[in-house]
Image: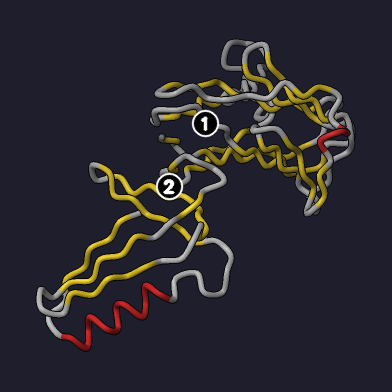
Amino acid sequence: MSVLCERDSRAELWALEREFSGLFAEGGTGTLTVDQDGSVLTAQVDLDGEPKPLTNLDAGFVSVEVPLHASDPVLYAPERVTTLHPVGVGIGLRYPLFADGVLDFGAGVTGDEVIQNFGNTTAYPIVWVYGDFPGGWQLTAGDRSIVWPWPTVLTAPVRVDMSGSIWIGPDNVTHLASVRRWVSIPKNGSLSLTLAPIQGGSGWGEVHQRDTYL
């Protein structure tokens, strides 16, 4: 990454040079932010070498090459969260009662939610499943499914990372899913995602999706 910054005084230039020299001094990763056509995109990066600032006091600028490495090579837009209601939620009496001479029941929620990716490369959403599902649950998009046949309790939500892993807290429990046909969203595309209990229960899902760009 190349950076050129102008300042009005020599003191500001020296301060800026010291700031560049100290980038990532404590190690770890940082957030690279890119403003692209009015959209703010981010990537997690770490230092891949030593920053080498060059201060030109007479011209009033500091230039620096900052070698960065990103383990995930894409840029992400801000996160959107969509709630999934399990299939069948909402079934109940339809009012007014006996409107057609019979006692009627309302229709249940289908559970389908459309998740979009406005980016220019494939996106892999993250789904959190919350609730009490004694027989587990299933996430489905078209002919692809994630089947979790184990009890889920509200205090231990399950996180499904569609890039290829399942987590409960800090523990990777991917191997416990009986079906692992991961779901992705194509560039500038969408998918319809459904959450369904296997043996009853109640709860909900949260789909965390970020438009993804190269």
Q: Secondary structure at mark 1?
A: loop
Q: Is residue 160 above or below residue 29?
A: above
Depth check: give the residue in front, 97 or 37.
37
Report whether 55 appears left or right of 148.
Answer: left
Which mark is nearer the camera, 1 or 2?
Answer: 1
Name which residue lies at 10% across and 78% down.
58
Res. 204 image quadrant: top right
Residue ID at (22%, 80%): 13
- The residue to which callout 2 is attached is 78
Is 58 located above or below residue 182 in the figure? below
Which amino acid lies under the numbered mark 2 shown in the image of this protein? Pro
- Label 1 and label 2: CA atoms lie apart by 13 Å
Identify the mark at residue 123; answer none if there is no mark.
Answer: 1
Q: Position of residue 176 (x, y in %)?
A: 88, 33
- Identify which residue, 59 or 12, lies in the foreground: 59
Count residues near mark 2 (Cα–Cα under 10 Å), then give few for <14, some for 14-19, many for 20+. Answer: few
> Pointer 1: residues within 10 angstroms few (<14), some, or many (20+)?
many
